[in-house]
C-alpha cells in the first residue's frame, strides 16, 4: 500500500479494513471507502470546508 498523502487539507489513507478513505484533521472519516488512493484524492481535491452556522440569538 502507498503512504498517507495530504490533499486539500485532508489525509488520504487506508482505514482499518485497508480501504481508502478521506480523513479530516481530527482523524474523522469524512468520505469513503474508495477503490483506490487516486479516487479518494480526487474526492478530497473538490471538498470545501463549510463554516459552522452562526449561533442563534436568544429571545428576551
Image (tube, rainbow, N blue to C red):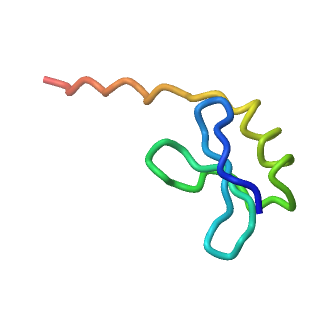
Please tell me which residue lies in front, 1 or 48.
1
* Residue displayed at 51% across by 54% down: 28
Name the residue at the bottom extreme.
17
Of 37 and 45, nearer the camera is: 37
Residue 23 in the image: state x and y as whole percent: 59, 50
Total labels drawn: 0
Q: Quadrant of residue 20?
A: bottom right
- Place residue 36 in its image quadrant: bottom right
Q: Is residue 29 left or right of residue 37?
A: left
Residue at 61 percent of width and 73 percent of height: 16
- x and y percent of residue 1 in the render? 77, 63
Question: On the image, which quarter does residue 47 sit in?
Answer: top right
19, above or below 59, in the image: below
- Percent position of residue 21, x then y: 69, 56
Relative image position of residue 6 (x, y in whole percent): 64, 38
Towards the viewer: 40 or 1: 1
Residue placed most toward the observer, 25 or 54 = 25
- Say which residue appears at 68% left-offset and 34% top-offset: 7
Instruction: In the displayed orientation, state which residue is furthest to the left.
Output: 60
- The answer to whether 28 is drawn above or below residue 19 in the figure is above
In the rendered image, the quadrant that contains the C terminus is top left
Q: Is residue 49 above or below residue 21?
A: above
Identity of the residue drawn at 65% across and 50% down: 4
Side of 57 relative to 25 (left or right) = left
Amino acid at each position: 500500500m502507498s503512504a498517507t498523502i495530504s490533499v486539500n487539507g485532508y489525509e488520504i489513507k487506508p482505514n482499518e479494513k485497508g480501504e481508502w478513505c478521506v480523513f479530516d484533521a481530527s482523524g474523522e472519516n469524512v468520505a469513503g471507502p474508495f477503490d483506490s488512493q487516486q479516487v479518494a484524492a480526487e474526492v478530497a481535491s473538490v471538498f470545501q470546508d463549510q463554516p459552522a452556522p452562526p449561533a442563534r440569538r436568544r429571545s428576551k
